[in-house]
Amino acid sequence: MKRLSIVLCTIISIVLLLTGCSNKAADIDIDLSELSSTLIQAEYVRIFSNPEDYIGKTIKLYGSYSNQRIDSSSYVHFIIILPGDDCCVIGIEFKLDDSYSFPEDYPALNSMILITGTIDTYERNDNTYIYIAVNDFTVP
């Protein structure tokens, strides 16, 4: 009986390991949502200094929502990270997919948001811009 219990426990453990232990955090390459202000600033500088090394990587950010009008009908949306020492405010553009409508589906200005998405770039007016293509967006 003891041997049967050990075999059953081993089989159950293997099945759980193979099927039930999906870890979403393992899918995130860069998690800035819980880092110190110094580490956030350092990672931000690395991303913007060498964007080609980060394109396609998944990033998680926590900060406040902001936007800026760029013409009569278009807005750019940002997540603003406020380091604890209030030294250097960091803003990163993000884009939600087409299922979101502005302003209906966006939070109020300065609302705290948590986003996860893929780092990418685009060209506008002969400039290259870095943004986060969001795949998970919450207002905690």
Image (cartoon, rainbow, N blue to C red):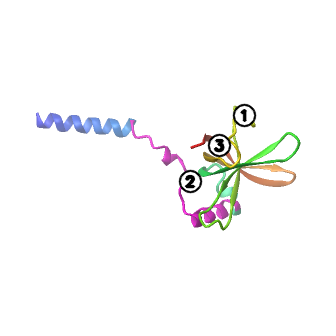
Residue 21: image x %, image y %?
40, 40
Front tag of 1 and 3: 1
Label 3: which secondary element = strand
**Rendering quarter of residue 106:** top right
- Position of residue 121 relative to residue 103, above or below, is below
The amino acid pointed to by label 3 is: Val
3D distance between C-alphas at marks 1 and 2 = 25 Å
Extent of the magenta region: 20-48
The secondary structure type at the circle numbered 1 is loop
Measured Cα–Cα span from mark 2 to mark 3: 14 Å
Q: How many marks?
A: 3
Q: Which quadrant is home to the N terminus? A: top left
- Mark sitting earlier along the chain (2/3): 2
Q: Is 107 positioned to the left or the right of 127 in the image? A: left
Q: Quadrant of the C terminus?
A: top right
- Which of pointers 1 and 2 indicates the residue nearer the eye? 1
Residue that badge 1 annotates: 104
Q: Residue furthest left?
A: 1
Q: Residues within 10 Å of mark 3 (few under 14, many from 20)?
A: some
Residue highlighted by disc 3: 134
- Rendering coords of residue 56 (x, y %): 64, 48
The circle drawn on residue 33 is 2
Magenta stretch contains residue 45: yes
Q: In the image, what residue type sits under mark 1?
A: Glu
Q: Residue 64 shows which numbered tag?
A: none
Q: Earlier in the sequence, mark 1 or mark 3?
A: 1
Badge 2 amino acid = Ser
Identify whether 109 is placed above or below 16.
below
Displayed quadrant of residue 6: top left
> Where in the figure is residue 119, as x and y percent of width and height?
66, 50
Q: Earlier in the sequence, mark 1 or mark 2?
A: 2
